[in-house]
Image (tube, rainbow, N blue to C red):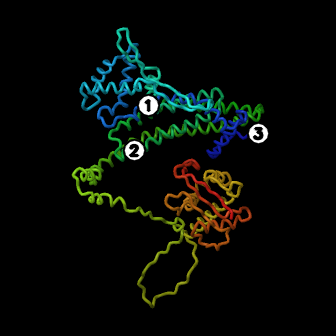
Amino acid sequence: MLNLRRSNPIIDGDDILAREIIQENTGGKDPEYSLADEFLEELDIRLEQVKVYYPIMDMLRKRKLDDEVLRLVPELCFLLLSYLIYEGKLKHKGITFQNMEAFLAKVLPKILVQCPNQEVLRELTAEILDGLQNGGRNFTLYTYGFKTGNLREKYIKFLEIKQSEDNVLEYRITEPGVDFYLRTKEFPEETKITINLLLFQKQMEKGAFGFAYETVRRLNMEVQKKKDRKYSLLEALMYGQLDSGEAYNRYHKSIVLQFEEEAELFNTAVKNVGSAFNEYAERINNGEADAKAERTFTLVKIIEKEIGRAQTLHTELLKEAVGFTKEYDKALGIRRKAIFTERFSFQGEFEKLITQNENPAVLKYLFEPLMNPNIKKSFNLLRAFEPQRVAKIRKEEIENQISEVEVDRITIDRLTSSRVKKNFVFYAAKLLESLDTSKQQVYLQDFCRNLAEHYSEDSVYNGDFISFIIEMNRDKPIGNHSRIISFADGRLPVDEELKTIEAVFIKAARLVCSKTNVNNVIVKSFPETEVELLPGLKITNMLFIGESK
């Protein structure tokens, strides 16, 4: 009988298995080819969605920075669009230039510190209209059509001008203009969890488990992103980027006010997965399921684990939101204390020298402290596990001196050092075995997955493993992200103390000499890429390459 136990395998292993099952259920189609097909099918639709943002990007690019009022045109276009929607579109009437000029004259004193005079106001109104209608021409976006093999033009305009019966030019906002205005606000970040939960619920009800799996993974990312938002807010507060509590209040309310609704949707989602689980389990126990149904049941179990993980993260999110108040108050307290701390105003002193036309040579006193080289200290982690000697000086009477006999005692330091050396050699040997393939290379994530599958997850969570990875990645030249560990086929003498990583690999190579021909290991790191080896264990991604001489 098929094992119905709801196990908790490695997350990455689940992902690979889930995608294999989805591929089987879609007729064995290669998932990467599916991505290419979807790209060709959806590209035109996506570009249609993107083109509504082109006018505002064009206005931002053409911003007139040399004029104090006209430089505000890109931002004020939203104000004029709202007026065209609520006073024009919803009331089914056109808006004249004079109407818009009068509107701006009324509301700008509430927005700006100093309202422009009538002449500047007229110029500002004209500039906003000119920006929104691209000087009377359609905005043109050039895109490439893969099916036709050439560039295509996509047009968009936010405003249209018509002459009224009284021979007066009237402005009306177009459908793309309304669409653009609504998209920039009406779908806030806070609703993404709710949207994904509703989508997941419909997919589970229809039995579209492949799509449901992608949705629940996306849901996990959205919940995690909201959790991480707390730390970015605290960091911004600590560095003075938040001068008020508005961002904090928005974040806190978005969690507390939506939590009840989201929690109810999570409960419904869990029930849907439970129903699918019980249905397939009953079919399998009754012998009514074929191989495809059994594989689908495995996918349902993976989805069940993912939705459970998302629900747990969501519960933690509320707890953190409650505790966020204390952390926020603590950060405010630190900032209040920092106000009375004496600081050196680099910008103020620099501007003082510039404005007072001081001798340029004086600038060296500002920049010299910043130009000193940053020499980083380094420390071999292996030395931390070596026996430590404590020397004592005692005054003793010569006649009372007693000859001491050295005793080989087993100390904690020696036990720790022995364990670390043994584990380093173990990990090095397993890495050499992993490299002994046709490709002779393995990514850190794959290496860890192999360790976890054969020796349990504890072998990766082990602190000695992290020390081993750090030691392999040390002593690289500045700006270089690769290092070569050469151990010359184990022919060099081995230092039993194993003080270097090369000595560790020499000993490991001798242990697996019959299984591998690798005698050089290249370690490449990718600082911009971070991978999660196991839940809660994140590290910079690395690639190990084996070479044979």
Residue 368: where, in percent of width, then height?
33, 61
User: Quarter holding the N terminus?
Assistant: top right
Question: Which residue is disc 1 drawn over?
Answer: 257
Q: Secondary structure at mark 2?
A: helix
Residue furthest to the top: 165
Q: Residue 234: which disc?
A: 2
Q: Residues within 10 Å of mark 3 (few under 14, many from 20)?
A: few
Question: Which residue is disc 3 drawn over?
Answer: 1
Asked if disc 2 and disc 3 are in contact, CB closer than 8 Å, the reply is no
Of the residues shown, which amino acid type is indicated by label 3? Met
The residue shown at (57%, 47%) is: 535
Of the residues shown, which amino acid type is indicated by label 1? Leu
> Disc 2 and disc 3: Cα gap in Å?
53 Å
Q: Secondary structure at mark 1?
A: helix
424 or 156, which is in the foreground?
156
68 or 279, which is in the foreground?
68
Q: Quadrant of residue 38?
A: top right
Q: Quadrant of residue 293?
A: top right
First in sequence: mark 1 vs mark 2? 2
Residue 131: where, in percent of width, then height?
39, 28
Q: Residues within 10 Å of mark 2 (few under 14, many from 20)?
A: many
In the picture, measured across the screen, residue 206 lies left or right of residue 332, that is right
The residue shown at (76%, 32%) is: 289
Residue furthest to the bottom: 399
370 or 290, which is in the foreground?
370
> Disc 3 and disc 1: Cα gap in Å?
47 Å
- Circle nearer the viewer, 1 or 2: 2
Q: Residue 538: which disc?
A: none
